[in-house]
Amino acid sequence: MTDLAPIADKLANAIRLLASDKDGEVVAAWRAIIRTLRGIGADIHDVADCIKHSGNGALNDHEMQEIYDAGVKAGIQQAQRTPRHNALVPQFPPARDMAMYCYRNLAELRSEWEIEFVTNMASLTRVRPLSVKQQALLEKIYIKLGGKV
């Protein structure tokens, strides 16, 4: 059976014209239907087969392909919007581990403020989580001292 999907709209419009009460419009519609079918290598038997098989609720190959393609496209778009947990995204170690790494490498720091900050973080990370600002500063010093992400 020939796939009539590419000409379905044109064919449907011509078939509706067959209901006209003017003989000239009916003949013109019939000729348009035949011309449209021949344009894709089909004939009236293909239309009859399409009507005969349309009642079973099954989708034709063209419709199934469209649905499949739309699903694949939606899946790709969702995957691009969703962060992947297993992706190679740099991740810092826990604050406690970074603080202890920095404390072990305290001698490499030149700034008194950084030395005091790292000393405070080494004890503070044992009792409570850091603020966002403290975390960012600790990460900066950790990287400066050669810590691995």
Image (tube, rainbow, N blue to C red):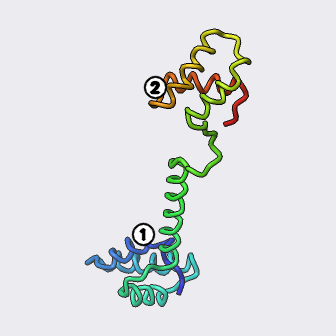
Q: Position of residue 58 (x, y in %)?
A: 42, 83
Q: Nearer the viewer, residue 135 or 98?
A: 98
Q: Are marks 2 and 1 in contact (CB under 8 Å)?
A: no
Mark found first going from the N terminus, 2 or 1: 1
Determine the CA span between mark 2 and mark 1. 63 Å
The mark total stands at: 2
Indicate which disc residue 89 carries: none
Q: Residue at x 64, y 22 (%)?
A: 141
Q: Quadrant for residue 111, please give it.
A: top right
Q: Position of residue 18 (x, y in %)?
A: 33, 79
Quadrant (top left, top right, bottom left, bottom right) of the C terminus? top right
82 in relation to 110, above or below:
below
Categorize mark 2 by other alpha carbons within 10 Å: few (<14), some (14-19), many (20+): few
Q: Which residue is mark 1?
A: 9
14 in relation to 47, above or below:
above
Q: Residue at x 56, y 76 (%)?
A: 39
Q: Quadrant for residue 92, please give it.
A: top right
Q: Nearer the viewer, mark 2 or mark 1?
A: 2
For the residue marked with disc 2, what is the amino acid? Ser
Q: Nearer the viewer, residue 96 or 62?
A: 96
For the residue marked with disc 1, what is the amino acid? Asp
SS under mark 2:
loop
Q: Position of residue 79 (x, y in %)?
A: 53, 53
Categorize mark 1 by other alpha carbons within 10 Å: few (<14), some (14-19), many (20+): few
Indicate which disc residue 131 carries: 2
Q: Position of residue 54 (x, y in %)?
A: 39, 85
Q: Give the side of residue 43 with respect to residue 109, left or right.
A: left
Q: Give the side of residue 113 with respect to residue 49, left or right.
A: right
Furthest residue to the left?
A: 21
Q: Nearer the viewer, residue 66 or 144?
A: 144
